[in-house]
Each structure stands twice: as C-alpha cells, then as structure tokens.
Amino acid sequence: MFKPPKNLVYGVHAVKEAIDAGTSIEKILAKTGPLHERVKDLLAYARKENVPVQYVPDEKITSLCHEANHQGVAAYLAQVTYESIEDIYITVTERGEVPLFVMLDGITDVRNFGAIARTAECMGAHAIIIPSKGAASINGEAMKASAGALHHLPVCREENLVDVAIFFESYDVQTVACTEKAVDTLQEIDFTKPTCLILGAEDKGINMSLIKRTTRKASIPMKGQVSSLNVSVAAGIMLAEVVRQRG
C-alpha cells in the first residue's frame, strides 16, 4: 500500500498545527483554482509566518497524498530547522568570534547548495542565508550533497535579502558580492572584518537591487579562456581566501 512521504502533512488542520508548533516548513502546496475560505485563511497565515506557498494542480497534491482527503493543501516539513540571522549574529559576537556568513541569491540547484554548505561548514562559516522564494529545497539530495554539513550549519531563510544586507550594514558586517564585473579582486578585500559573502546563480548572477546594497564587490582572478566558475567552486575559493587571511 502506497503512503504519503514521511515529511508531508496535508489538510488545513494538520498544516496549521505544524506552523503553530514552530515546525520548519519547506513549502506549502495549494491547489490552483477556487479555494475554501479556510484554505485562504491558512495561506494568509503561512505568508505572515514567512512560509513559501506554491500553487500546483489539484491532481499533484492528490498524487502525493495517495487519494487521502487533503482539502487542497499540503506541506513539506523541512529537514533542517530554520534559524534567525539576528539570533545567530548575537550568539557569534557574544562568543567573541568574527562573524562569517554566506548568502545565496537565486541558487536553486540542490547539489550546488549542498556542496556550498559542505564547504562553508568546513571553513568555519556561521550560517547560510537563503531567500524564502527561489532557493534550492533542502531535501534528501541536498543533505547528501552536504555530506552531513547541514546537520551542523545553521540555515536562515529570509523574506528579503536586501533587508538582510541593510541589517548587516547597521552592525558593521561587510557584504561582499562575488561578481566577475568587479574591479577589485578577492585578494584586495580585507576579510579579517566581519563578513557576509554573497553568491548568485550562474545564469543570472546576484540581483541588482542586492548588489547595490553591498559594501564591496570582488572578482576571482582567472587566466583561462573560460570566464566563469561553477558557483560551488567559486564559494570554495572565496571561503579559502577568508580562512587564509584570518589565519
């Protein structure tokens, strides 16, 4: 007998209970088309709690729930507990450590995400920051690609990455965007300061509104004919430079 995935809950009451309990939710699936008022209220509540909502055909949810009565809504429970960037910053500074964060803008490939998390944890980063929409799902494949790093490295899911950059600016944490268009190279940035590294998707790069709020921009020196790197490789090079400078 087929059963729904273990990390899937469905039905208005079950999904609301998960939110009320503070359970980290990867995303909510809601059916397209007319919705019952209870479902509309639930989705409004979910958005208020910064839980992503994705609309899919009713047949998709029915297939996932294997014909169970889902009432047009289901939710994937996250495999990690999302944490607050403010809380992590306070904890890090209270320990007397120099903050190091990695912000990922628009990176949706779960293997790249997992590989970056693995490198970030190895290099001593304090957290990874992702947007609530347009980010890789932290599923089994991402967990595997991270080689267990996501069990140890906090993940912060934020509604607006520009707001996070503004938050860092107010606390003197420099935000360094990795972009091939930068004049300064990686080695010209002082990474002994509190830092948040920012990387974007390989096809689109970092959102321009976010780049405008960054403290510095840095490029990775290259000598070959190919002018771009896989984003997880770029993250590794940037993090290695941070570790080198911090000794």
Image: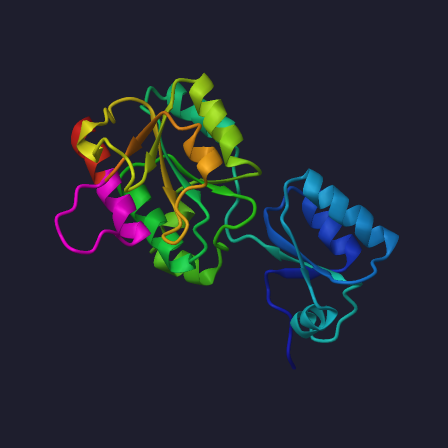
Total numbered labels placed on residues in the image: 0
In the rendered image, the residue lying farthest to the left is: 223
Of residues 77 and 210, the one nearer the viewer is 210
Task: Residue 75 in the image: state x and y as whole percent.
Answer: 66, 57
Q: Which residues are magenta?
A: 220-239
In the rendered image, the residue lying farthest to the right is: 37
Task: Residue 40 in the image: state x and y as whole percent.
Answer: 81, 50
Residue at point 67%, 74% (across, down) = 63
Answer whether residue 226 is magenta in the image: yes
Q: Quick check: 4 left or right of 215?
A: right
Task: Residue 66 in the image: state x and y as whole percent.
Answer: 69, 75
Of residues 48 and 147, the one nearer the viewer is 48
Which of the 4 quarters of the picture holds residue 197?
top left
Q: Above or below — where is 121 with respect to 171?
A: below
Task: Residue 62 in the image: state x and y as whole percent.
Answer: 72, 72
Of residues 166 and 73, the one nearer the viewer is 166
Which of the 4 quarters of the picture holds residue 69?
bottom right
Residue at point 76%, 60% (across, down) = 11
In the rendered image, the residue lying farthest to the bottom is: 1
Of residues 46 and 202, the one nearer the viewer is 202
Answer whether residue 83 is magenta in the image: no
Residue 243 at least partly seen? no
Q: Above or below — where is 113 with respect to 198?
A: below
The image quadrant where one finds the N terminus is bottom right
Q: Quick check: 127 left or right of 187?
A: right
Q: Above or below — where is 214 with respect to 144?
A: above
Residue at point 20%, 36% (across, down) = 241
The image quadrant where one finds the C terminus is top left
Residue 53 at least partly seen? yes
Query: Which color scheme is applied?
Result: rainbow
Q: Quick check: 247 left or right of 37?
A: left
